[in-house]
Image (spheres, helix red, strand yellow):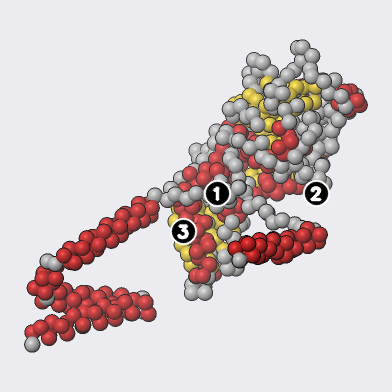
Amino acid sequence: MLNRIFGLLGWLGVALVLSAVALRLLHSDWQQTYNGLAVAGLVCTLLYILSQWRDIAHVMSGRQAKLGALSIGSVLLVVAIIGAINYIASRQNQRWDLTANRVFSLSDQTRRVLESLDAPLAVKVFARSDDFPRFRDRLTEYENAAHHMSVDYIDVDQKPAVANQYQVQSYGTVVLEYKGRIERVVGDGEQELTNALKKVVEGAAKKVYFVQGHGEKDPTSADQRAGYDAAKAALESDNFAVEPLPLVQQGRVPDDATVVVVAGPRTDYLQPELDLLAAYLRRGGKLLVLLDPPDRADAPPLANLEAFLRTWGVEAGHDIVVDASGMGQLAGIRSPVVPAVLRYPGHPITENFRVMTVFPLARSISAVPGGTEGHVAQSFLETSEQSWAETNLEAVFETGELKEPEEGGKTGPIAIGAAVTAPATEAPATTASGTTGDEAARGETSATGEATPQADAAPKPETRVAVIGDSDFAANSMLGAQGNRDLFLNTVNWLAQQESLIAIRPREADDRRIALTADQQTMVFWLSLVVIPGLLLAAGVHTWWRRR
């Protein structure tokens, strides 16, 4: 009778455990109920096992039992090893990205921005629950790289009030909150997320002014050679606002100018204009000069502008850089007057920069030995050792014959970019928070137009000047070539004293689709569906016939 009762207990225990599993799957919110059933079922099963201890001991004493115990022990050992591996893997995140552009790995710039966070960053994903996995796959990488970041996934259909609170207008919206500032972005791509991250971290967009009036590149033009609207879009993605600056008409560099760009002037600057730029630099201004080489053999030099740069320790050569190394062919460019650069002397602009850059018609830009007026420049772009600075411009423009430089000529590597830093001698007084009095009065707004607290303490004011011997490398036709875009943006961010943004930026996956003509499609059809299968069939029939 007692054995029968214990037998019923065993069946009852199995039934209770199965009931607990079913409740867990069907009603996950009934946690207390299925936990109680599971515990009761395990207790009944344990009592049944204890009641059968004699039979179990008899069975375990046989040879088959020992072999079975060995097998069970081996299985448990393998399960324990797999469990240990998963335990370690859950705490040590490691992925291998084998794509050509590493599109499934965070870019250097994204990692730098995340590592620079000094306050909590709250990220809220508003989407349907079915879409959470694709956001989680990307944002988990962000969480692993950041020290102060939390991510919440909110189903818009289940919590519409929260979505309204954050002014969410569409599914797939990601809201970033940092130090009271809010930024919204729709999408899960790294470019979109990182651009929004930069905006919410930096606060109000900084101003970049392009000087106009001397044939400079136009930031609003879509022309392939003279237009800079692609560069303008790239700057806006780095949280810069871009505006033209007719210096002669305005009579002053605006106070809100973070960086002033002189991009490829065709005529020389007037001395009053240079005086305005000099006054701006004394106030801690930042200046980027992209100076093209002469466009014809008898072109007059930009004497005033070149003399102005010489006061900052930068010498602009009256020459054209010729590169005979053939590196440009790697970028699809065969002309020797289009040098490709892979040498980047140590400078923050090109720190860890290992991407080729291409410069159509560049001139040498070197540091004046010993400096000028206390300004000591440093080169950050150099061509190959097989290059030289061609001063015989007639040979370049008229005959097209390029010969190796004579003894004493300027041979490679040739510097085509230099930068200099100096104290701001007339910097505006700063408040205790590190901002100027004007900035404190203006306050700051987020990129979404919402009022926000004052941004972080500004870096110490200083003057920075960068000069590159070519402006075409950032034009619409060349900005996408190799590392040109990253170099241009890195230079502007260094001038703006935003070192955390100097890095290789997120890249899109390459479009590797094959475009076939109608004839090629027909050839592929016959080869794949007729010729190759026919040859295999013929070989099979031939083998069968010989064996027969």
Q: Which residue is mark 2?
A: 222
**Mark 1 secondary-structure assignment:** loop
**Residue 218 — which label?**
none
Q: Is residue 413 left or right of residue 186?
A: right
Name the N-terminal-most of marks 1 and 2.
1
Any part of residue 196 in sight: no
Residue furthest to the top in view is 407
**Mark 2 secondary-structure assignment:** loop
Q: Which residue is mark 1?
A: 98
Any part of residue 1 in sight: yes
User: How many discs mark residues in the rendered view?
Assistant: 3
Q: Nearer the viewer, residue 82 or 38?
A: 82
* Residue at the (69%, 27%) spot, across then down: 383
Quadrant location, the N terminus: bottom left
Circle 2 Cα neighbour tier, 10 Å, few/some/many (<14 / 14–19 / ≥20): some
Amino acid under disc 1: Leu
Circle 3 Cα neighbour tier, 10 Å, few/some/many (<14 / 14–19 / ≥20): some
Instruction: State how far apart marks 1 and 3 are (Cα).
Output: 27 Å
Q: Is residue 430 above or below residue 16?
A: above
Amino acid under disc 3: Val
**Mark 3 secondary-structure assignment:** strand
Instruction: State how far apart marks 1 and 2 are (Cα).
Output: 35 Å
Whether pointer 1 and pointer 2 mark residues with C-beta atoms closer than 8 Å, the reply is no
Quadrant location, the C terminus: bottom right
Q: Quadrant of residue 369?
A: top right
Q: Which residue is mark 3?
A: 151
